[in-house]
Amino acid sequence: MLSHGDANETDNLSHIHPNVITIGLSGPSSGGKTTTSRYLRSILPNSTIIHQDDFYLPEDQLPIDPKTGHANWDCPEAIDFDSLISTLTFVKEHGKFPDGFDSLEDKNPVGSETSSDPIPDQVLEGWREQIMDQIPQDKRPHTKFVIVDGFILYVNERLRKTLDVKFYLSASYQILKERRESRKGYATLEGYWVDPPGYFDDIVWPNYLAYNDPFVKLMEAVEAGQVTGVYDAKSESSRPDPMTQEVDLVSSNSSSIHSMVETVSDLLAKRLAELP
């Protein structure tokens, strides 16, 4: 885990290294964001993942759900956002993690028991070429990608402002429930966490609805055909909530991980072409 004293937070982000590109991947638990993040790390040269789950408070400091008495891992108060932001700032400024950083989340398996076959290397290479074509050739050797993976990234305004490209991966209640309940558990600072019976319905789903409400409503509008999930600055009036600004929505309801990563790769190439 990160030794918090090694990362001095900087509120003024205007002096960040110009060849560092930050990519946010958020969405509900079991929505496919960590699997997609790991594939992006394979696709993008000189890339690093920062997992929001590495910035949970110690278990004895987590909020307690008043109805169930269980630790609530699924609310903003469970995350040390100051340390997350300072670490991201450090990586952007120095091109590396602070001394002492060690990711527990990278040790956790991802995917359900019915995970799809791995995406072939030659397919990943094709997506890499498509994405890197958007970076000027003289800048490619010096460009670093920092992928930030987390279930509740965009609720924090300061964190949103550090991200150059933003995605939100979602799925239906039933799919998320099946995926979450197929997992065996999660490595934590104190050892290992296994969801108690009913944890998804009692904690995970209600918190998702409460803290990602703008995205829940936007995804409903997308599924009804009223708006598109791809962000367009010309029609930003259809997204009045700042949480959803400049965020591309990707649904994993009926998508394989192959098609999800392909969609994110296509959109990432589009967004890189638009960056100043």
Image (spheres, rainbow, N blue to C red):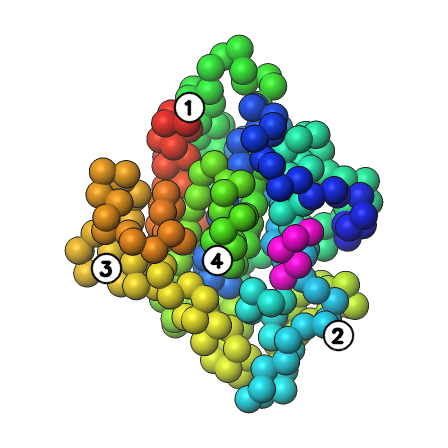
Residue 45 screen position, x and y as percent? 58, 27
Q: Residues within 10 Å of mark 4 (few under 14, many from 20)?
A: some
Residue type at mark 3 is: Ala
Q: Residues within 10 Å of mark 2 (few under 14, many from 20)?
A: few
Viewer-proximal residue, 18 or 69? Answer: 18
Label 3 or label 1, whichever lies nearer to me, is: 1
Q: Which mark is residue 276?
A: 1
Query: Mark 4 — residue?
Result: 155
Q: Is there CB contact under 8 Å for labels 4 and 1?
A: no
Magenta segment includes 50: no
Q: Separation of disc 4 and disc 1 at Cα?
A: 25 Å
Residue 173 screen position, x and y as percent? 39, 71
Q: Is residue 213 above or below residue 35?
A: below
> Which sits earlier in the primary sequence, circle 4 or circle 2?
2
> Which sits earlier in the primary sequence, circle 4 or circle 3?
4
The residue shown at (54%, 15%) is: 139
Query: Mark 3 — residue?
Result: 221
Picture quadrant of residue 71: bottom right
Q: Separation of disc 3 and disc 1 at Cα?
A: 30 Å
Residue 128 screen position, x and y as percent? 48, 27
Q: Which mark is residue 60?
A: 2
> Dot 2 lies on which element?
helix
Q: Separation of disc 4 and disc 3 at Cα?
A: 20 Å
